[in-house]
């Protein structure tokens, strides 16, 4: 009772119950359906799938909508590891999944899905199908137009899948009618060019959706129905608010219990999966418009991360429920932490979109900031806590060092963290400065908060030496000393007065003049160019590769490239710098053609190399010495945080084995 009062005190709207159909949901937080790819290759539910959803149910979400489950495999599948719900063979796993959600007080829905033309024959082994033989510009594969009897068969498969869901213990289903998948393809004139009873007028285009809803209501009247629908396709000729409003009103009349508002398709660019530059809750206006026109509950969301913001949306009546996607990947316990008012304890999503990037690559998703996502049981730490105190020296306080130190402290270690600078955070202190990277600072602050909540002894402004080794006599040493900038061997560079990325972003130096040449067009170089362009500089990026920022997640990369173009940044790819002299940079293209670029300042963004000066001196620690993060190999925050967690676990396990060995 006391916990409930605290929740009502902090965010009363967010943690008030709501009626959806015949069921009450304990709060207004919906876990959005996100395809994570943890299922078996044959579409069965895996233990990893169960662990992942159960963690979010334990974390306090009121309604969990399980990711897109295919009602017509393989033709309707989008990717590898996707769940299937078109045969009784899947019921055992689905039943275990629904039970794992419901036993923690969350309501369990499952999304019913058919990809239509937004798939590939490389995945399904079949030509994609669609309302019309119009290819998706992104998938670039001609679909086969469905015959009327085939459409009716697909309607029956949706209805039968709903029956399977009910048998498996799900309390509701969500029909996926959004994001450019099959039902959305029928609803939109952009993709539906039929002239029969399933095309042309809006009444005809929504026929497949209404037939499915009617069929489910007639055959399984006690099953709640949600529809996830695009309110705006953001493509020429696609659904817009007026048509979508009419569809939603028809859905209400047909008996739908919840309308889940979203937007965008594969072809709409950045509006279906947003980059970091989009503001929190940017698409909530779509749900707000629909809420004015229907009386059933309406869910909205999009980039929601702040509980106070979510609560305000509900208080102002802009939606009835708030869906969380990436925020629940970053922290499964977001609801419970918000409910308790522990906002600083919420692990922030930095909107890097690594999760989405994994899905695009056809691999199970993982999270940059949360190594437990997809590894919920594998990284359980309770069974490895040693019984005897042990001391660990962690050298370096970047993301790898911070994560290792806090985790080890939780595992009973006496941890001493050494940092040669006055401030912890490593390269996060610089990475948070470019435009729209402020969430990296939130991650740094979260890691520091986590560290300050632990018993770790922190020593700043001190570079670890062998003398410290003699003083503290640690059982284990973790080298997390990060990386330092690479300086390429270019004739004349040393005498050019060049700046590093860190110097520019931290404003330790001011680039003179108006024209700046950035040597290196990776992610760091492009973000630095974006930063300088925002200060009114005229930038030329010189990159020896054929494209800029090739390793960057594609949604955020597209957004960054758009900003560079808008800022007038000149992009010189496939160019090699041969020499620098008197504010002039000589380059040659891939055909050997020389060119002179005049500039007032030069910024070198050629990447980084590992920094581990103590490694050779500490090798006698053998298996008790760990080198992690960029000190091992330059990558990024995801690898650093994951290795920090894994290293802490490995040290605790080794210590426990040694203890048991001594007892034996």
Image (spheres, rainbow, N blue to C red):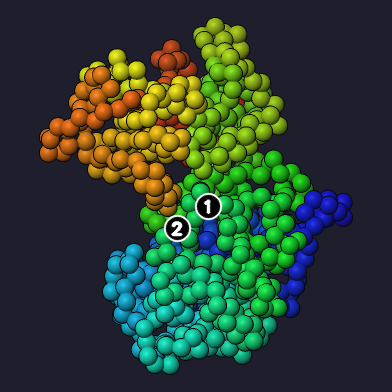
The relative height of residue 78 versus residue 418 in the rendered view (above or below) is below
Q: Secondary structure at mark 2?
A: loop
The relative height of residue 571 versus residue 424 in the rendered view (above or below) is below
- The percent coordinates of residue 193 (x first, y second) are 36, 83
Marks 1 and 2, the one that precedes in the sequence: 2
Looking at the picture, tell me which residue is in the foreground, 657 or 108: 108
- The percent coordinates of residue 377 (x first, y second) are 58, 49
| Tag 1 near tag 2, CB within 8 Å | yes
| Residue 360 seen in the current view | yes
- The percent coordinates of residue 451 (x first, y second) are 65, 30
Looking at the picture, tell me which residue is in the foreground, 248 or 552: 248
Q: Secondary structure at mark 1?
A: loop
The residue wearing badge 2 is 270
- The percent coordinates of residue 212 (x first, y second) are 53, 85
Query: Would residue 643 be found to the left or right of residue 602 on screen?
Result: right
The residue wearing badge 1 is 278
Residue drawn at the location 49% of the way across and 86% of the way down: 202
Residue drawn at the location 34% of the way across and 30% of the way down: 515
Q: Which mark is residue 453?
A: none
Separation of marks 1 and 2 at Cα, in angstroms: 9 Å
């Amino acid at each position: 009772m006391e916990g409930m009062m605290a929740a009502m005190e902090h965010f009363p709207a967010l943690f008030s119950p709501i009626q959806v159909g015949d069921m009450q949901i304990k709060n207004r937080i919906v876990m959005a359906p996100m395809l994570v790819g943890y299922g078996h290759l044959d579409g069965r539910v895996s233990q990893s799938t169960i662990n992942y959803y159960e963690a979010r149910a334990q974390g306090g979400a009121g309604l969990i909508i399980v990711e897109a489950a295919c009602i017509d495999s393989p033709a309707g599948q989008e990717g590898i590891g996707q769940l299937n719900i078109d045969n009784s063979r899947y019921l055992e796993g689905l039943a275990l999944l629904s039970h794992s959600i419901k036993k923690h007080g969350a309501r369990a829905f499952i999304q019913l899905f058919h990809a239509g033309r937004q798939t590939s024959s490389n995945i399904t082994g079949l030509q994609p199908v669609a309302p019309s033989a119009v290819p998706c510009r992104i998938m670039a594969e001609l679909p086969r137009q469905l015959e009327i009897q085939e459409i009716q068969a697909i309607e029956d498969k949706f209805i039968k899948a709903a029956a399977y869901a009910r048998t498996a213990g799900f309390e509701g289903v969500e029909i996926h009618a959004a994001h450019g998948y099959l039902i959305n393809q029928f609803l939109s004139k952009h993709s539906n060019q039929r002239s029969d009873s399933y095309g042309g007028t809006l009444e005809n285009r929504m026929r497949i959706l209404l037939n499915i809803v009617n069929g489910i209501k007639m055959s399984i009247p006690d099953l709640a129905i949600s529809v996830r629908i695009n309110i705006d396709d953001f493509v020429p000729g696609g659904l817009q608010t007026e048509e979508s409003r009419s569809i939603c009103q028809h859905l209400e009349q047909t008996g739908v219990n919840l309308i889940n508002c979203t937007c965008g398709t594969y072809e709409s660019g950045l509006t279906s999966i947003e980059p970091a530059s989009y503001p929190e809750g940017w698409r909530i206006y779509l749900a707000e418009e629909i809420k004015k026109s229907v009386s059933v509950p309406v869910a909205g969301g999009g980039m929601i991360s702040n509980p106070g913001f979510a609560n305000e949306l509900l208080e102002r009546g802009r939606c009835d429920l708030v869906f969380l996607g990436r925020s629940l990947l970053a922290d499964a316990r977001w609801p419970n932490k918000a409910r308790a008012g522990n906002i600083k304890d919420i692990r922030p999503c930095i909107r890097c979109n690594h999760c989405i990037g994994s899905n695009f690559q056809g691999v199970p998703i993982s999270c940059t900031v949360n190594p437990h996502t997809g590894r919920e049981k594998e990284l359980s730490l309770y069974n490895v806590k040693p019984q005897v105190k042990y001391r660990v020296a962690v050298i370096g306080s970047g993301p790898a060092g911070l994560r290792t130190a806090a985790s080890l402290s939780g595992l009973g270690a006496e941890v001493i963290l050494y940092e040669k600078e006055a401030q912890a955070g490593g390269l996060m202190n610089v990475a948070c400065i470019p435009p729209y990277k402020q969430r990296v600072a939130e991650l740094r602050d979260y890691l520091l908060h986590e560290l300050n909540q632990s018993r770790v002894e922190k020593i700043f402004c001190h570079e670890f030496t062998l003398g410290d080794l003699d003083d503290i006599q640690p059982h284990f040493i973790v080298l997390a000393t990060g990386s330092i900038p690479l300086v390429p061997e270019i004739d004349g560079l040393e005498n050019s007065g060049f700046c590093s990325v860190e110097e520019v972003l931290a404003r330790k130096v001011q680039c003179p003049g108006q024209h700046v040449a950035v040597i290196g067009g990776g992610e760091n170089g492009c973000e630095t160019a974006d930063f300088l362009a925002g200060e009114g500089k005229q930038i030329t990026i010189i990159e020896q590769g054929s494209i800029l920022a090739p390793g960057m997640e594609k949604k955020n990369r597209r957004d960054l490239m758009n900003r560079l173009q808008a800022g007038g940044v000149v992009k010189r790819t496939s160019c090699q710098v041969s020499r620098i002299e008197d504010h002039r940079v000589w380059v040659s293209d891939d055909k050997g053609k020389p060119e002179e670029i005049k500039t007032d300042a030069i910024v070198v963004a050629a990447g980084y190399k590992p920094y581990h000066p103590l490694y050779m001196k500490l090798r006698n620690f053998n298996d008790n010495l760990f080198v992690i993060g960029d000190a091992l190999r330059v990558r990024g925050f995801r690898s650093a945080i994951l290795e920090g967690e894994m290293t802490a676990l490995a040290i605790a396990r080794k210590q426990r084995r040694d203890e048991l060995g001594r007892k034996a």
